[in-house]
Amino acid sequence: MVGSEAVCFFDKMGWEVFGIDNNMRKYLFGKTGDTSWVLKKLKEQTKKYFHFDMDIRKRDMILEFFSKYRFDLIIHCAAQPSHDLAARRVFDDFDINAAGTINLLESFRIHSPKAVFIHVSTNKVYGDAPNRIKMVELDTRWDYAETIYHRGIGEDFPIDQSTHSLFGASKLAADIIAQEYGRYFGLMVGIFRCGCLTGTNHSAVELHGFLNYLVRVALSVQQYTIYGYKGKQVRDQIHSSDVVNLFYEFYKNPKCGDVYNLGGGRENSASVLECIALIENITGKKINWNYSDANRMGDHICYISNLDKIKKHFPKWKINYKLIDIINEMVSKIPELS
């Protein structure tokens, strides 16, 4: 989703864009995770996009690829993204998230060291430590009881002494090594710890892509299951277009190993129950959902990204898509994509 958004963004600017992808999402999640429809659209709509069916775990192949081409900007958004799947596919999870990341970083250092490297990390690097923040239960959501966290969780929040899930641990390994390539080698590397990234190009499944999947469920009259926390768990949603716009701002003013928490912020935050209500109001359809007390291991009760550091470093950047805009766009476009 983020990769395809980046392809379109830079293609429109006249850049040559090289994409590495092997539709691993279909292998991980099955038919509904298939991303071939996105690739087909990119090939039809772009002018200078060059696609390479490659696996980032194949070190020699990646090194050879980087030896043939020189890049100005590298956006690494490949990942095994599921909490639950990581525990069942341990080697796939670590090899993609951790080993795949170092393959790309070392290829970048050797062959395109003057480029800017953006690593898409996750708020799951904080593990379940955010759950130790004092919470208050409201009618439709959990929220932070302490005013210090009203604007969200900042980059100085601790990353250890918590349960991450194996997914969170493999992504944390990648996060730390990406920082070192910036700090130790002095390379232009930015680490973006993302909340809920969303948009219409998501091949959403139950295990990953919450908002897009929920809209698909609503439009197809399927059943949705809420896992734990009374459905009041909160996430801040950010459209992939706003994500890529920030990446471009970082490219123009890069840092060496800086970390940023990236999400929709408080303005774009909503609980599962609140998202259901918004979608029902927009579509006029009731969502058929049930509830399970079993929350996912290491899952956050409430997570809102503090955007203060991003806004300070990149004052020209802003969020253009409000939560209601994101849902409206999905409702209007998903039927034609399904």
Image (cartoon, grey):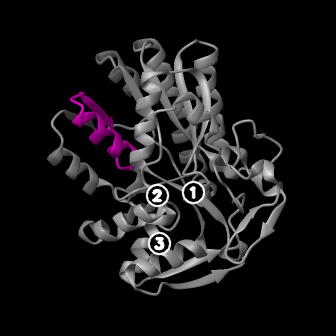
Find the distance from the CA under tag 1 to the CA under tag 2: 8 Å
Q: Amino acid under label 3? A: Leu
Contact between marks 2 and 3 (CB within 8 A): the answer is no
Q: Which residue does the numbered mark 3 point to in the structure image?
A: 214
Q: Is residue 58 visible?
A: no
Q: Is residue 156 above or below residue 108?
A: below
Q: Is residue 316 visible?
A: yes
Find the distance from the CA under tag 1 to the CA under tag 3: 20 Å
Q: Which residue does the numbered mark 1 point to in the structure image?
A: 267
The mark lying in front, picked from 1 and 3, is 1
Dot 1 or dot 3, earlier in sequence: 3
Q: Quadrant of residue 67?
A: top left
Q: Amino acid under label 1? A: Glu
Q: Residues within 10 Å of mark 3 (few under 14, many from 20)?
A: many
Residue 304 location, x and y as percent? 65, 53
The mark lying in front, picked from 2 and 3, is 2
Residue 80 location, x and y as percent? 51, 48
Label 3 secondary element: helix
Q: Is residue 69 above or below residue 303?
A: above
Contact between marks 1 and 2 (CB within 8 A): the answer is yes
Q: Which residue does the numbered mark 2 point to in the structure image?
A: 322
* Disc on res. 179: none
